[in-house]
Image (spheres, rainbow, N blue to C red):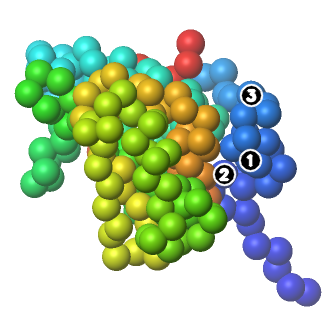
Amino acid sequence: MAKTSRPTGLRQFLSSEQQRDWLDGKINLPDAAERAESIEQRFRYAARFEKLLRRPQGKQVLELLKLYGPACIPIPRRTERFHWSVSCLPSTSDKPLVRVNASWMELFTLYADGEDVRARFITHLSDFTTDGSATPGQLDEAFLEQSVTKPEDGSWFFPSGPDMFIVKLRGAASIRKFIADPRALRAIRTFNLTHMNRGRNAYQASHSYSVADHMLPD
């Protein structure tokens, strides 16, 4: 008798129909009431969190994450750390303030930009083309320019991966506008679902519960 494979990623918690409805903004998904928290893990990164709070960008970072978490991550309480994570002042060469990951993939990163912030979103190219293809020549540049406060706040790149697209934004105002735009939000959600469905998060050990406190809805 053939063994039935167990679902991975978000499929353990959400049906394909629920995921599609959330992607389209049709439903609010029921989340866990409590968090499965590790006190040891919380204390491991407590000093980094205090250091972030002392940065001139600290307040802006937490405000943006408070917007990003509920809007862009499905059932964030139930999936915290093991299916997505947020790192505080991670020790990488690009010196981010915070980085959100799922599976083996970066989803969203915030950096210092003077006393303001800049962001990097990794998405699918096909969500930003005029014909839904992964063809760089079909990029909808007009939409991208309109999705931020000022066109010069945005720039974008085509990395080597298939159907990959990087959006870089400068300034908290343009980051907020981008997340609030229905088409951009759907693109962010699509990419996040792709990688949250790929299995367990590889960055569990760097998860900062103190930062995540500000990403979870009340």
Distance of label 2 from label 1 (alpha carbons):
9 Å
Q: Which mark is residue 19?
A: 1
In the image as oriented, which residue stretches furthest toward the right?
1
Q: Label 3: which residue?
A: 28
Give left or right: position of 1 versus 5.
right
Please identify the quadrant where the C terminus is shown.
Answer: top right
Percent of width and height locating residue 138: 51, 67
Percent of width and height locating residue 5: 76, 73
What is the secondary structure assignment of the residue under circle 1? helix
> Depth-wise, is mark 3 or mark 2 nearer the camera?
3
Q: Residue at x 54, y 32 (%)?
A: 181
- The kind of residue on which mark 2 rests is Leu
Give left or right: position of 185 versus 61.
right
Distance of label 3 from label 1 (alpha carbons):
10 Å
Q: Residues within 10 Å of mark 3 (few under 14, many from 20)?
A: few
Residues tagged 3 and 2 counted as in contact (Cβ below 8 A): no
Residues tagged 2 and 1 counted as in contact (Cβ below 8 A): yes
Q: Residue at x 13, y 32 (%)?
A: 113
N-terminal of the two: label 3 or label 2?
2
Question: Which of the 4 image quarters holds residue 60?
Answer: top left
Question: Which of the 4 image quarters holds residue 66?
Answer: top left
Q: Residues within 10 Å of mark 2 (few under 14, many from 20)?
A: many
Q: Label 2: which residue?
A: 10
Please identify the quadrant where the N terminus is shown.
Answer: bottom right
Q: Residue at x 32, y 55 (%)?
A: 156
Give left or right: position of 92 versus 69.
left
Residue 32 drawn above or below residue 132: above
- The kind of residue on which mark 1 rests is Gln
Residue 163 drawn above or below residue 60: below
N-terminal of the two: label 2 or label 1?
2
Is any part of residue 88 visible from this angle?
A: no
